[in-house]
Image: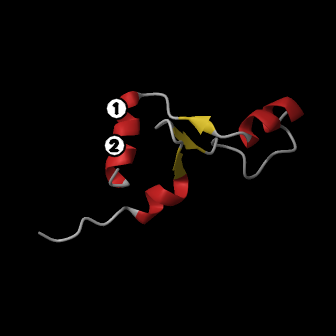
Amino acid sequence: MPKVKTKKIVTKRFKITKTGKVFHRAQGRRHLRRKKSKSRQRRQDAPVQVRTRKFANIVKQFMNL
């Protein structure tokens, strides 16, 4: 049976903690930041946890965990 390769883009976009939580970067934080409030920008700079367990399981599956 061949080796199962990981999806490289998934490893770049998502991080998994030791407890198994899946985090990603917040959307909308790269440009047009001048009109966003400073508190909103700080919230977007922090990593965001994936909301649904189903999607987190898909991400882990792509990472072969």
The label on residue 14 is none
* Neighbourhood count class around disc 1 (C-alpha, 10 Å): few under 14, some 14–19, many 20 upward: few
Q: What residue appears at the point 67 percent right and 43 percent down from the top-left corner?
A: 28
Residue at horizontal 80 percent and vertical 38 percent from the top: 41
Label 1 element class = helix
In the image, residue 3 sits, relative to residue 27, either above or below, namely: below
- Give the side of residue 63 with respect to residue 24, left or right: left
Name the residue at the bottom extreme: 2
- Which residue is farthest front? 18
Tag 1 residue: 54
> At x 35% / y 62%, what residue is drawn?
6
Amino acid at pointer 1: Lys
Q: Who's the residue at 38% across and 36% down the image?
A: 55
Q: Which mark is residue 58?
A: 2
**Does 42 appear above or below 6?**
above
Image location (x, y in percent) of residue 47? 65, 40
Residue 8, percent from left and from top: 43, 65
Q: How many marks?
A: 2
Residue 5 lies, in percent from the top left, at 30, 66
- Disc 1/disc 2 C-alpha distance (Å): 6 Å
Residue 39, above or below 34: above
- Determine crowd level at label 2: few under 14, some 14-19, many 20+ residues with C-alpha closer than 10 A: few
Position of the N terminus, as image quadrant, is bottom left
Amino acid at dot 2: Ile
Question: Image check: 10 left or right of 54?
Answer: right
Tag 1–tag 2 contact (CB < 8 Å):
yes
Q: Tell me if residue 52 comes above or below residue 56 in the rendering.
A: above
